[in-house]
Amino acid sequence: MTGGNLARAVGGDLRRHWRHLVAGGAGIALTIAALAFFVALWLGVRGVLLGEVFPLHRVEVHRRAAELNLLAVKLALGSDTIGDEELAAIGGIEGVAAVYPKMRLLAPAVATGGEALLGTAMQTELVADGIDPSLVADRVGGAFHDPTVDPRNASVPCTGDGGCPSGTACVGATSFRSGSCREPIPVIVSEHMVELYNGAFSRAYRLPKINPEALIGLGLDVDFGASSLRPTGRRTVRERLVLVGFSDAAMPLGVTLPLGFVKRLNRQLGPAGAADGYHSAVVEIRSADAAPGVTAAIEALGLEVRDRGARRIATALAVVLAIATAVGAAVLAVASLHVMHVFALLAMFRRREIGVLRAVGASRRDIRSIFVIEAAVVGLAAGAAGLVCAVAIAEVADRLRLDRLPDFPFAPESLFVFPAWLLAGALGVAALASVLGALGPVLRATAADPAELVSGG
C-alpha cells in the first residue's frame, strides 16, 4: 500500500469513527493535562527555591570553631577563619569552578542618611562584610570595585559634592568644618532585603513599595569605628557609601563592601589579627550533579558547608516529583486501557472491512499501519488538547494568585514553567500510550484468516 493510499485510508477512518476515537482519547487528554500542569508547577517552584532562595550551585564554606556554652552566652574556642592554603585546596577539588573569599567587618559602624528614600535622615548601626568583586561581576559589573584614593582629590577641601571632581563626593563636611573629595565606596545589598521590605515590612508600616532599580546611586555617610550603642574610644573613619547593585551573594541583612576595603578597615579599626584570615568562602560548583562530591571533599578538609538547606529542599522536591510521576503513570496506564477497549470495539466492528482489504491484496502490515497511525494521531491530538488545558489552567491559577493572595518574598511572575522538552515529551508520551493501548486489539484483528473475517465467523 502506497503512502497516499495509506493516508487516505487513515483519513477516512478518522472521519467515520471520530466519536469513538474522541471518547478513547479523552482519558489521555485529561491525564496529560494533569501531568503537564503538576510538572510545570514543580519546575517553577524548583527554579525559585533552588535558583534564588536556596541556590544549589553555590555554597558557603566556614570553619566551625568550638564553643563553650555559659547560660545565654557562647564563647568561641579557637579560630574560625580560613587561610589562603585552605582556599587553594578547595579550588583544587574536582567540580569546583571558583572560590571567592569573604571577610566580616569587625569594626562597628554607624550609617547616616536616607532622606531621599524616607523623607527624613536616619541613623543606624551598620553590619557589613566584604567579598571579592569578581563574584558579582556578571550581575553588577565594574561598578562594584575596590576604590582607590587619589591623594590629589583627598587634599581638596570641600563643603559639598558640587565642589568635587567628577566621580568623587565630599566626605566629612559639616556645618563647622570642611570635608575632602574622595571616591565613594560602592556597596551591594541582597535582593532578599528588597523582597522582605516589599512584602511584610511595607505592609506592616504602611510604607510604599520600592523599585529596586530606582535605588541605584543612593548614598549614606558612614562613620567606621563609631557606635551608637556604646563609646568605642577609637578613632573613626568617615566614608560615603553608594549603592551600585543587588545580588544574592550579598549578606542577607546588611551591606556588602569590596573585600580589599574591608581588609583595610579591619587592619585599621578592628582587633589585632582581624585581617589575617577570611571568615568564609563562596564556592561556585560547575553543576548541580557535582554538588554532593564537592561537599564531601570540602567536609573532608575539616570545614563546614552551609547551603541554607538546598540539599534538603532538592531531595524533598525529587521525592515529590517521583510520587507525582508514579501516580501519573498509573493514571496514564488506565487511560491506555481505555484506548485498548475502544480499538477492540473498532476492530470488532471493522472485521468485514479488514477481511475485504486482505482479500484485495492488503498485507497484515498495511492494516496494522492504518490502525497504529490512527492511534498515534488520536494520542497526539489528545496530548495537544491536554497541554492546552494545562496551560490555560496555569494561566488562571497565576491570575488568581495575583488577585487573591498577598505579595510574598521571591514570588515569581509565574508559578509554572513549560519548557519545550516538557511539551514535546507530553505529546510523545500521549502518542506512545495510545499506540500501546491499540496494539493488542490490532494484532489480534489482523491475525485472523481473511475468509473468516469476511464471513463474520
Image (tube, rainbow, N blue to C red):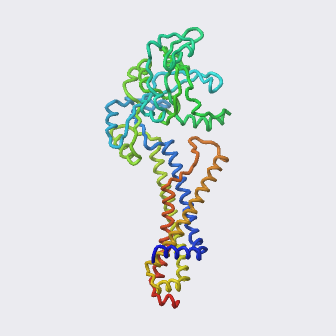
Pick whichever, 447 or 309, lies toward us.
447
The residue at the point 49 percent across, 25 percent down is 186
How many marks the image carries: the answer is 0
244 horizontally vs 274: left or right? right
Placement of 393 over or under 442, stated as above or below? above
Pick whichever, 211 or 257, lies toward us.
211
The N terminus lies in quadrant: bottom left
Across and down, in percent, residue 210 comes to 62, 33
Q: Quadrant of residue 85?
A: top left
Pick whichever, 423 or 297, lies toward us.
423
Across and down, in percent, residue 153 comes to 47, 14
The residue at the point 67 percent across, 47 percent down is 403
Residue 327 seen in the figure: no
The residue at the point 49 percent across, 68 percent down is 433
Across and down, in percent, residue 162 comes to 57, 15
The residue at the point 40 percent across, 45 percent down is 287
Placement of 44 over or under 244, stated as above or below? below
150 horizontally vs 20: left or right? left
Placement of 167 over or under 102, stated as above or below? above
Q: Quadrant of residue 214?
A: top right
Placement of 36 over or under 444, stated as above or below? above
84 horizontally vs 50: left or right? left
Across and down, in percent, residue 143 comes to 48, 28
Residue 329 seen in the figure: yes
